[in-house]
Image (cartoon, rainbow, N blue to C red):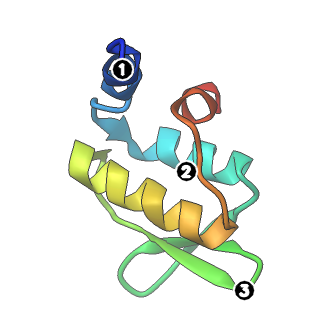
Amino acid sequence: MDTGGNRHKKAHLATTAENETLIHKIHKLGFEGPYSGTRHQFMVYRNHRLAIPSNLEYSVPQLKMMVKEVEEIIGRQIAIEEWNGL
């Protein structure tokens, strides 16, 4: 039974994220970098490379897409509570 709690928790992700904040959070998940690439900065986790778009801020769809990519790279899901606590 959904009491609406999930909708409230998702609302915390529904804001823009600044580039520095995003890099800081990804770094706390074990990524190294950022490093300068030819078009974008990138971060590295083991043998995986994550491109960091050059935006100063990210929209909700961009942020969700990046979090999903990070989850695939690290091999686990990131709970909203964990993301917000990074």
Residue type, label 2: Ile
Residue 47: which numbered mark, if any? 3
Residue behind mark 2 = 23
Badge 2 marks a residue whose secondary structure is: helix
Quarter occupied by residue 49: bottom right
Q: Work out whether residue 83 or residue 56 is closer to the camera in this orientation and state it.
A: 83
Residue contact at pointers 3 and 1, CB within 8 angstroms = no
Is residue 21 toward the left or the right of residue 26 in the image? left
The location of residue 65, given as percent across then percent down, is 34, 60
The disc at residue 85 is: none
Lower position in the chain sequence, tag 3 or tag 1 = 1
Task: Describe residue 86's horizontal placement relative to residue 14 as left or right.
Answer: right
Query: Residue 55: x percent and y percent?
Result: 28, 55
Q: Residues within 10 Å of mark 1 (few under 14, many from 20)?
A: few
* Residue in the image at 66% along x and 74% along y: 44
The amino acid type, in three-letter code, at marker 3 is: Asn
Q: Is residue 84 visible?
A: yes
Q: Which mark is residue 2?
A: 1
Give the image location of residue 46, x and y in percent: 77, 78
Q: Residue at x 39, y 24 (%)?
A: 6
Task: Assign the N terminus to one quadrant of the image.
Answer: top left
Residues at marks 2 and 3, CA–CA distance in whole angstroms: 18 Å
Distance from Cα at disc 2 to Cα at disc 1: 33 Å
**First in sequence: mark 2 vs mark 3:** 2
